[in-house]
Image (cartoon, helix red, strand yellow):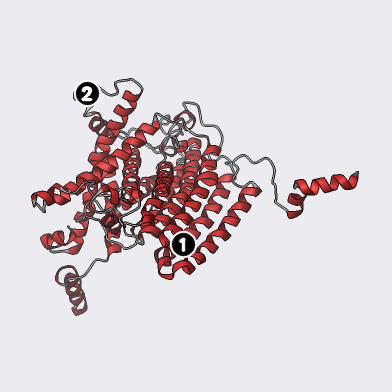
Amino acid sequence: MYNFLTELTGNEIIAAFISAMLPVVFIVPFVIFGVLAERKVSAHIQDRLGPMRVGYHGVLQTVADFFKLIQKEDIIAEGADRKFFNLAPYLVFVGSYAVYAALPFTSTYIGSETDIGLFYIIAVSGFAVAGILMGGWASNNKYSLYGALRSAAQIVSYEIPTALVILSMVMLTGTLSLATMSEMQTAYFWNWNIFGGAEWAFTKLLLIPFMFIAFIILYISTLAEVNRLPFDMPEAESELVAGYSTEYSGMKFAMFFLAEYGNMFAVSALVSVIFFGGYQSPFGYLGNSLGLQWLIPYEQLFWFALKGILFVLVQMWLRWTLPRVRVDQLMTICWKYLIPYSFANLIIIGLITLL
Amino acid sequence: MIFISDSIILVTKIFIDIKYMLTEFGKIFVFIIFAFLFVAISIFIAKLIRPSRPTKEKLTTYECGEDAMGSPWVRFNIRFYVVALIFLIFDVEVVLLFPWALTYKDYGFYGFLVGIIFLVVLAIGMAYEWRKGDLEWARPAPNIPKLNKILKNMPSVQEKNETTEN
């Protein structure tokens, strides 16, 4: 893809800019669809109808919301720290968008083929914490400050189980690159990492239960990292109004919102790449059997989007199934359960891979 | 003048003539620049469209309709600070473990053991933290683990004490 763009435009920097633009082409429709899906899913779980007025069954509701947001007055409260207040949406969005640079959408398109993709993703998610803290502090608002502090503490604590699970997967696969990791889980679904990876040996059977534990730990901790229910302490509506984004309005609020939904898909895609083969199809490619090689990347994009959206839907489902946890329960879940379990899991997976 | 024209030629050469490679991290940098531009452009477009009629009421800090009371920078729980400190230690540890996780297979069981010793030392630190009560959110009183205290509470020692008293 990148080489093709370079040949087309004749300049590497222009090609890099175009390839950096492509995830936005994916994210913006995803957010428009995702916000509507969230409202519809919530409504139907609670036996309501949800948005019905704009378009057929409210299909265009999010588009209307977007046009409303773009017209809204931008209010910066008195006493707010204007510089940091304006800078915060940038940092939060950059932190969420930079993750997409290391995600392989298909075997032909990946933003940057670094050898240390996973490591980079763990590092770059810290951007968002800085942005959230900055926004909360600069808002000059009690709710924002509490929301930002809770959010920072939560993201920071749940980063450790995430990193430990990723570490154990690195021990298993021996690579930090997400593209290589997807390539290894090729062909059929029993080659996925959740079923013990592509190597056929007796260790594969031993690995399966520990892979499931690792998957559950990773899913819970990524759920907490994107501030979704049941871990939405930072935005607990009944306590903190809207958390760190209380004082934001108009397009700046929209940027926070975009970053949140972008993050939701990014972590779902990360889970699917690590455990469920990323862009790989579960049962061979249509393009291979028909002899149409150009079809394969499109199929891969379809599977990648499908797996990601499936995990996003599970996030929405969990939102209306589980009640919100308290702050002390949140910390207990992380430090006393997830971290010791992922520690033990790491050692066991390391031992089994060594056999 | 010659110097300036030379430098202009050099710059144009860099941008047009010479085939140079962007490294993979260069592409990531382009990603970050693009994200900044995306936010800047969308906020700028909104700025062209949106009204701007601030009033005194609008610009007050939001506090559910009441007038804001006192300073917004209120006191918060010291736990947040402790959590950040513990996180720092663990994160540094994870960073140190990544190179080990990539290459430990080459050194067989010995390589595995080296990493495990490091992990066990950390686990002991974690156990100390836990016993000291730093992982509790609402902490009643500091409970510093001391060897004498633990021995005193052990049942065998207590029994001995009772027998001597009798």
* The C terminus of chain A lies in quadrant: bottom left
For label 2, the crowd category at 10 Å Cα-Cα, with few meaning under 14, some 14 to 19 and many 20 or more, is few
Horizontal and vertical percent for residue A32? 25, 36
Which residue was labeled with disc 2? A57
Q: Secondary structure at mark 2?
A: helix
Q: Secondary structure at mark 1?
A: helix
Quarter where residue A8 is shown: bottom left
Classify residue A48 as left or right of residue B125: left
Q: Which amino acid does the dot numbered 2 rest on?
A: His
* The N terminus of chain A lies in quadrant: bottom left
Q: Which amino acid does the dot numbered 1 rest on?
A: Leu
Vertical comparison of A59 with A302: above or below = above
Give me the C-alpha separation between circle 2 and circle 1: 52 Å
Vertical comparison of B137 with A51: above or below = below
> Which of the pair B122/A186 is nearer the observer?
A186
Q: Residue furthest right?
A: B166
Q: What's the mark number on residue B97?
A: 1
Vertical comparison of B101 with A94: above or below = below
**Residue under mark 1: which chain is it in?**
B
**Residue under mark 2: which chain is it in?**
A
For label 1, the crowd category at 10 Å Cα-Cα, with few meaning under 14, some 14 to 19 and many 20 or more, is some
> Which of the pair B162/A120 is nearer the observer?
B162
Q: Residue at x 51, y 56 (%)?
A: B90
Horizontal and vertical percent for residue B101? 42, 62
